[in-house]
Amino acid sequence: MEFQFENFSSFLAMNGHGPYVWAAYGVALLVLVALVAVPVLRQKKLRQEFDRQLRQEEARRRTAKQREVQQEPVTPA
């Protein structure tokens, strides 16, 4: 099997088409990374928001329960 290019630098140059080819590979790689990274980051942000809302709701329930306990009338025994 014979290699098409004489050396590595001619492989990178690709008979004058190298800048276009490598730029296309770079753009494609960036798009693929973005297609993976964006949903992962969005999911992380949504989980944090959900956890924050859950903590707030639990705090509201505790506060409401404490107010109910404090407002209960005292009945003599």
Image (cartoon, helix red, strand yellow):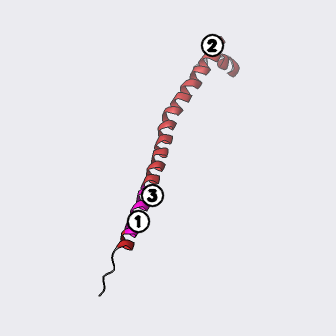
Q: Secondary structure at mark 2?
A: loop
Q: Earlier in the sequence, mark 3 or mark 2?
A: 2
Q: Position of residue 5 (x, y in %)?
A: 64, 16
Residue 69 seen in the figure: yes
Q: Which residue carries the number 2 mark?
A: 17
Q: Position of residue 34 (x, y in %)?
A: 52, 32
Q: Which residue carries the number 1 mark?
A: 62
Q: Secondary structure at mark 3?
A: helix
User: What amino acid is at disc 2?
Assistant: His
The image shows residue 45, relative to residue 17, as above or below, that is: below
Q: Residues within 10 Å of mark 2 (few under 14, many from 20)?
A: few
Which dot marks residue 55?
3
Q: Which residues are magenta?
A: 54-67
- Please check the rendered image and state whether residue 46 is part of the magenta-colored stretch, yes or no: no
Q: Position of residue 45 (x, y in %)?
A: 49, 45
Q: Nearer the viewer, residue 23 or 2?
A: 23
Q: CA distance from mark 2 to mark 1?
A: 68 Å
Q: Nearer the viewer, residue 71 or 66?
A: 71
Frontmost of labels 3 and 1 is 1
Q: CA distance from mark 3 to mark 1?
A: 11 Å
Q: Position of residue 73 (x, y in %)?
A: 33, 76
Residue found at x 37% / y 67%: 65
Q: Earlier in the sequence, mark 2 or mark 1?
A: 2
Residue found at x 37% / y 72%: 71
Relative side of 23 to 49, left or right: right
How would you classify the magenta stretch by its main secondary structure? helix
Q: CA distance from mark 3 to mark 2?
A: 57 Å
The image shows residue 11, relative to residue 51, as above or below, that is: above
Instruction: Determine contact: label 2, label 1, CB under 8 Å.
Output: no
Q: Quadrant of the N terminus?
A: top right
